[in-house]
Image (tube, rainbow, N blue to C red):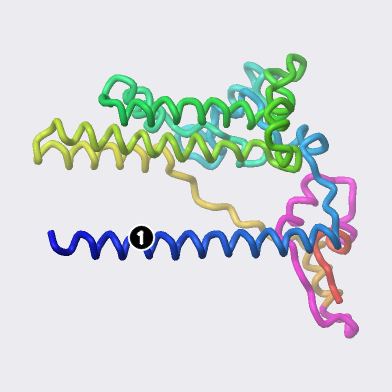
Amino acid sequence: LQLRPRVRLIFNKGFLFGLSLFLLSISCSAYFYAETYREYPLEREVSTTVATYAAHVSDWFFMPPNNVLYGSFREKASVIWPDFVRLGIPSEHNLFLGFVPWGLYASGFFILKGRKYREYYYCSFIVILVSIVLSFGPTVNITNSLHFPGFYPIISVIDPLLFAVRVTARFAVFPLFFLSLISSFVLADASKRMSTKHAPVLFLAIGLLVVIEYLPTSFQFHTFSEDEKGVYRKLQQRKDIDVILEYPIGNLLPYQYKEARVEDLDAHYLLYAS
């Protein structure tokens, strides 16, 4: 009991130190971003990137293609509903978070009792709903031909910086966080009602189901073609080049622009040499 004030004091100091460090880090990041943007304006806003980087309604029903259990579902569904399911999207637009977390979250409505838990649950529901709406961007795309204006422009009146967001689909991180939070509450509350023998079994079973549901396939590494290797051989022979800065995202360009030469793609997009 005598240590409690000291522990509280240490906690408060640690909290203040962590908060100060956090504020300092975001201030430095904001300063350097502003300096970079001033010299090199990106000219990116949601109105110009929404066609590629905004989520569609169907994106919330599928996992990435490298998922062992559900990876092939999007391609199969696109054959049945081609106007509803889109292909060729970035992996981060596969926004289905799994049956296990959604099931735990839904069960929390019936399992979690008490005012504190209910407040957390209702708050998380509002945040999840708003985040899903924001992930669609200014327009909610249901099919290729059916779409209607979303609430993004209305909410951006409160926070104008939302129009500077490039990938609105990344708002899915908030549902992921709150699903995890409520799921932990559900498991903690359920363990209190179980015996010490059964609670570990529950945690082990849930953990195993999560691992199985999120299990990815083996990673497929990019292999260089002979044309790409020829580019590097030519660069190696250049005596006026000392530094080569490679952007890995450029490796995708030859697949997106089949009609362009690999040499041109490497010269303009993949490599900056000086």
From the viewer's perspective, tell me whether residue 233 is left or right of residue 135.
Answer: right
Q: Which residue is mark 1?
A: 12
From the viewer's perspective, tell me whether residue 122 is left or right of residue 32.
Answer: left
- Residue 219 or residue 119, whichever sits in front: 119
Q: Quadrant of the N terminus?
A: bottom left
Instruction: Tell whether position 113 is magenta.
Output: no
Q: Secondary structure at mark 1?
A: helix
From the viewer's perspective, tell me whether residue 222 is left or right of residue 186.
Answer: right
Location of residue 178 with respect to 102 vertically, above or below: below
Q: Quadrant of residue 250?
A: bottom right
From the viewer's perspective, tell me whether residue 23 is left or right of residue 43.
Answer: left
Type of the residue with mark 1:
Asn
Residue 146: image location, x then y, percent = 74, 14
Residue 97: image location, x then y, percent = 48, 34
* Span of residues in magenta: 236-265
- Residue 180 or residue 65, whichever sits in front: 180
Q: Quadrant of residue 192?
A: top left
Residue ID at (28%, 59%): 8
Residue ID at (71%, 62%): 31
Q: Quadrant of the C terminus?
A: bottom right
Q: Quadrant of residue 272?
A: bottom right
Residue 209: image location, x then y, percent = 33, 37
Location of residue 52 with respect to 110 vertically, above or below: below
Residue 167: image location, x then y, percent = 69, 41
